[in-house]
Amino acid sequence: MTPHPAMQAFIDLSAGAIGGAACVFSGQPLDTAKVKMQTFPTMYRGFIHCFMSTYRQVGLRGLYRGTTPALMANIAENSVLFMSYGFCQQVVRFMAGLHREAALSDMQKACAGSVASIFSSLVLCPTELVKCRLQAMFEMEASGKISKGQNTVWSVVKTLMKNEGPLGFFQGLTTTILREIPGYFCFFGGYELSRTIFSNYMKCEKDRIGVAATMFSGGFGGACLWIVTYPMDCVKSRIQVMSMTGKQAGFFKTFWTITRTEGVRAVYSGLTPTLIRTFPANGALFLAYEASREFMMKHFDSENKSAV
């Protein structure tokens, strides 16, 4: 029996939240290295240098700096993303003239994920802005661009509200949406394509391909996302961090300034830790999402059967 749309939305939202939390805990240190390298590409010789320098300077907590807003960002983003993904799949079915429970192709699911990302961007942008600023705090203090003592979630939020008002939390929103729409097309498309290949090879349904194949598919989807969208993400991080020192230019001007003064390689700075991170982080995301969603759906079915 298919759950009521409201119940289905609640299940998708809850499973997305669980997946988002799993993603953060498994990938936060590598995400911190990514943001530092994006924002200060000339400060580090590479991923290992950035990772080890951060560990020596601040310790393990430095690699997990920004975890609180990252949790908020990922739980909020993935809750809204997967809830919207469910709704958008129904919209795709309606537009394609399919019945409510019809199976969608990998391409149709990719389109649904792409549209769903617009809604998730609205909750992701403010929390990701705080996260990026916290992750780059040591470098901002060391370079003299900000004073010390602004290294907590509350101090960043308070400074934002005081200097820029509520709209300040949405700096980089345009860039975030520009990144998310093609990114999540590739994300869901890559994930579903990989699962299809595994299911055909194993001669079983997608839901029965196992833990390792599910995690690899999640990582493959994440790799597809980052390879396509990384320059936009780099510009977004630069806008969100550098706006601490004053008004920051928009996406196209920032992109042009970076490539003209620092070269094209600068917008790919930090790609290595990102691709390394994407397999455990997005593997954990989809594994937690699929497992928790299946558990809740089974619980819903058993409740309905017992009621009958």
Image: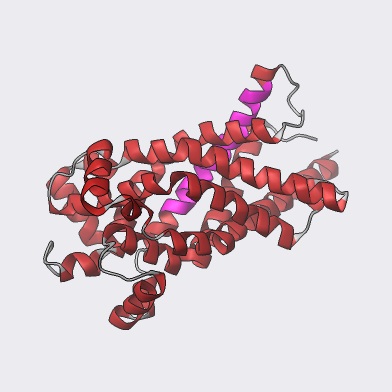
Count of picture labels = 0
Residue 141 painted magenta: no
Residue 150 visible in the snapshot: no
| Residue drawn 35% across the image and 63% down it | 66
View extreme (right): residue: 203
* Colour basis: secondary structure
Q: Is residue 97 left or right of residue 10?
A: right
Q: Is residue 122 above or below residue 73?
A: above
Q: Position of residue 41 (x, y in %)?
A: 29, 61
Q: Is residue 284 above or below residue 60?
A: above
Q: Is residue 181 left or right of residue 9?
A: left
Q: Nearer the viewer, residue 38 or 288?
A: 38
Q: Nearer the viewer, residue 7 or 268?
A: 268
What secondary structure do most residues of the magenta stretch adopt?
A: helix
Q: Quadrant of the C terminus?
A: top right
Q: Is residue 292 left or right of residue 305?
A: left
Q: Position of residue 262 (x, y in %)?
A: 24, 54
Residue 80 painted magenta: yes
Q: Position of residue 304 (x, y in %)?
A: 80, 41
Q: Position of residue 194 (x, y in %)?
A: 70, 48
Q: Quadrant of the N terminus?
A: top right
| Residue drawn 62% across the image and 40% down it | 189
Q: What's the magenta region?
A: 73-93
Q: Is residue 112 above or below residue 239?
A: above
